[in-house]
């Protein structure tokens, strides 16, 4: 019984860690609904990197972060980087993106 519980728990945890697939339109709709929750006007999305098929992002959702991915064909980014591991740069990815301006890199002073 312990082994079955261990296997079920492992499957659940792996599922939670996997990036969920979003579309560009879903991200923009989420941003439009939630922009008021970020009073400092900072973008709640950080770019984590790109592989052969997806762009990966961290989305700040109230009190937590979501690991999401978007098909490369939907977003054409100028500054493409390899996927940052959670140990790289404090696990928050390469840079903040401006959702309203084509997911361009945001310069933070």
Image: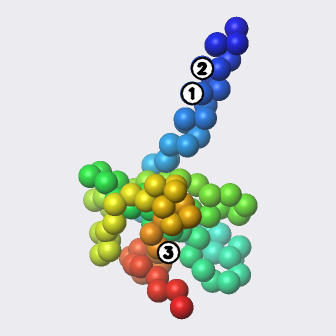
Packing grade of label 3 (10 A; few <14, some 14-19, many >=20) is many
Q: Which residue is mark 3?
A: 96
Q: Quadrant of the N terminus?
A: top right
In primary-sequence order, the first of circles 3 and 2 is 2
| Disc 1 to disc 3: CB gap under 8 Å | no
Side of 35 where 57 appears, left or right: left
Structural distance between the alpha carbons of marks 1 and 2: 6 Å
| Disc 3 to disc 2: CB gap under 8 Å | no
| Disc 1 to disc 2: CB gap under 8 Å | yes
Residue 5 spot, x, y in % from top left: 68, 17
**Is 15 located above or below residue 37 in the figure?**
above
What residue do we see at 54% from left, 60% from top? 91
Q: Which mark is residue 54?
A: none
Q: Which mark is residue 7?
A: 2
- Is residue 57 something that shows in the picture? no
Residue 56 spot, x, y in % from top left: 43, 57
| Front-lying residue, 48 or 104 | 48
Q: Which residue is mark 1?
A: 11
What residue do we see at 45% from left, 49% from top? 21
What residue do we see at 56% from left, 76% from top? 43
**Is 87 located above or below residue 80 in the figure?**
above
Residue 72 spot, x, y in % from top left: 31, 58
């Amino acid at each position: 019984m312990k082994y079955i519980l261990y296997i079920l728990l492992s499957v659940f945890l792996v599922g939670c860690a996997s990036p969920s697939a979003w579309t560009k339109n879903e991200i923009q709709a989420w941003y439009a609904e939630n922009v008021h929750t970020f009073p400092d006007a900072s973008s709640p999305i950080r770019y984590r990197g790109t592989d052969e098929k997806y762009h990966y992002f961290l989305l700040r959702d109230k009190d937590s972060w979501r690991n999401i991915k978007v098909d490369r064909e939907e977003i054409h980014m100028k500054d493409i980087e390899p996927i940052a591991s959670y140990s790289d740069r404090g696990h928050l990815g390469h840079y903040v993106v401006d959702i309203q301006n084509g997911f361009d890199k945001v310069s933070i002073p």
